[in-house]
Amino acid sequence: MNRTGISTVPVPHSGERPSQSVPALGATPRAAGCATPPALAITGVSKAFGGLQALSNVSFRVEPGEIVGLIGPNGSGKTTLFNIISGLLRPDAGSVRLGATELTRLAPHEVARVGIGRTFQIVRPFQGLSVLDNVAAAILYGTGQQDVRAARRQAHEILAFVGLAHQQALPATQLTLSQKKRLEVAKALGTNPRVLLLDEVFAGLHPRELDEAIALVFRLREQFSLSILLVEHVMRAVMQTCQRIVVLSYGQKIAEGTPREIASHPQVLQVYLGVDTHAHGH
Amino acid sequence: MIGRHDGRYVTGVLVACAFLPLLRPQEYVLTFLYNLFSYAAMASAWNILGGLAGYLSFGHVAFFGCGAYVTGLMLVRWGWSPLATAPLGGLAAAMLALVAGYPTLRLRGPYFTVVTVVMVLAVKIVVLNVPWTGAAMGLWMPFPPWDPFVSRVIFYEAVLVILLATLLGVRWVLHSKFGFGLRTIREDEDAAAAIGVPAFRLKLGALLLSAFVCGMVGAVHGHDRSYLHPDFMFDLHPSIMIVLMALFGGRDHWLGPLIGAVAVMIADELLTVYVGTEAARMLFGLLLIVVIVFLPAGVISLRVRRQPKPVPAGRGLMMP
């Protein structure tokens, strides 16, 4: 997990991220290479809001280095699950484990420190801060970094990686939507995550931006040796990036498999397209 | 004035102010500056929580009053000079902040603000009903043992020292990790948590720091007045003035609240003389609304924004 591997892009201060390799508070050593324990294990998670069962008994895993897609119609519980993983919501039952660490008992900021980086569906940059300081703040609090200058140098590297180096001095408000989404990713990366949760980062991008974003997701995984769980509606992006897809409908997992399997899964087609598969003698 | 060397200029001017009494100015001038420095110190301290973290408190006068009462009681009971016990007054104010802040800092936005107002009223009622504080009779303290002009000079110098220390402290906070965390809380508390910011702890730290300064200023003022009454020491008006100064001046620069204090104090003095106190208060209310709506980053943002923005690699540029 040597992060100085970012050197494929021009890096002015490589070798300046020693603190990034220090595991954050309560973090367990990374399962480097050994494939047995999953990076993220979601087991039997249920959550109700009053009478509405938002999630019922959802289980799946994200293996180290894997990109997993979480799809489902609006209201199927995807964002609820993200909020449970990142500690904003507490599940009624079930567990979420990052390596050996149980996340459901942690506060959101503790979850961020043990290695979950997340983006928000509606982009939420810190508006009064510069682009650079947005990422520097993530480095200061997501890792053990104490020195603001060092954090800014590291932030510059991450911004160069996501393609925002030229915008670093701008107030975050002045970015385009596509740039704000990159900034969200850069902020999440700043916390030195083991698992990255991407909430609709592909939505609203035009075709060329979409291609760039897809390429970025792959580069992220390679350079930062991340596991990625992404919620997405843009099917092209899901099919191109994910090795495995989990489908939610009304809070239940109705399917899990490779993109090819999911694309022809009868129940998925029914949920998405309203196709009555039984009428065709399935 | 707001540039690279602003720190040196302002520190220089304030240090020069320390020698002003040697020129034997009119007592009016010293009193005006004494009030100005007191307000500036409290507005700067308020800014740590209200400006940086965005948690508007209208309750800081409670910390001011707490510092005055605690050190005043120590003078009455044990004969300890409030000038020596001012840090204890600050600590007492920080204790009050801890008790008040621990439950309320979990509230957000307007809810927190409402609770801070209630805190002032609650503390006032407690002081009014506890006999050993003097209760509704007020607390009579021994007069300072110096002749009037010397007293004026001593209190003036005391708040000047507090102001300088506060300004330098706030400047440090602004550029520190702590300051970064507070600003992310102001911008978006959930997003701040998502990058690992322990929001509650930082907010509580900011509240305790700002309460400490207000308690120190309160200790000096209590000694100066020699008579404390809950109606004066827990009056909401100074709280509103503090908020106005900090927001008017600008929250993201360590000199913002000082500039705001200068502007508001001069305006207050002129309005009180030429228009009358009631009209002055109405105008301040109006000004507060105008500033919050049209100039959320304060008058200092007009000046700072015009500066050229160099873009060397790996430097943060938006914040001074």
Image (cartoon, rainbow, N blue to C red):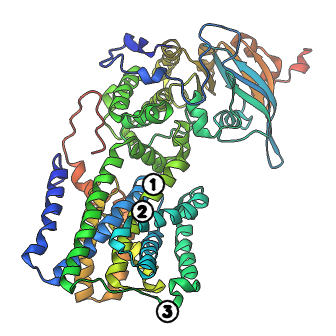
Residue B255: x and y in percent read: 26, 57
The alpha-carbon separation of the residues under discs 2 and 1 comes to 10 Å
Residue B256: x and y in percent read: 28, 59
Looking at the image, can residue A115 be seen?
A: yes
Q: Do circles 1 and 3 both sit on a common chain?
A: yes
**What's the residue type where badge 2 is placed?**
Phe
Task: Residue at 46%, 13% (x, y): give it.
Answer: A2
Q: Residues within 10 Å of mark 3 (few under 14, many from 20)?
A: few
Residue B206, which numbered label?
1
Image quadrant where residue A264 sits: top right
Looking at the image, can residue B54 be seen?
A: no
The alpha-carbon separation of the residues under discs 1 and 3 comes to 34 Å
Give the side of residue A1 with respect to residue A156, left or right.
Answer: right
Seen from the viewer's position, the closer of residues B134 and B33 is B134
**What's the residue type where badge 3 is placed?**
Met
Of discs 1 and 3, which sits in the foreground?
A: 3
Q: Which residue is denoted by mark 3 in the rendering? A: B137
Task: Residue at 30%, 50% (x, y): give it.
Answer: B171
Q: Which residue is denoted by mark 2 in the rendering? A: B212
Check disc 1 and report its element: helix, strand or loop: helix
Q: Residues within 10 Å of mark 2 (few under 14, many from 20)?
A: many
Residue found at the far bottom of this picture = B137
Q: Do circles 3 and 2 both sit on a common chain?
A: yes
Check disc 2 and report its element: helix, strand or loop: helix
Q: Earlier in the sequence, mark 3 or mark 2?
A: 3
Q: Residues within 10 Å of mark 1 (few under 14, many from 20)?
A: many
Q: Earlier in the sequence, mark 1 or mark 3?
A: 3
Q: Chain of mark 3?
A: B
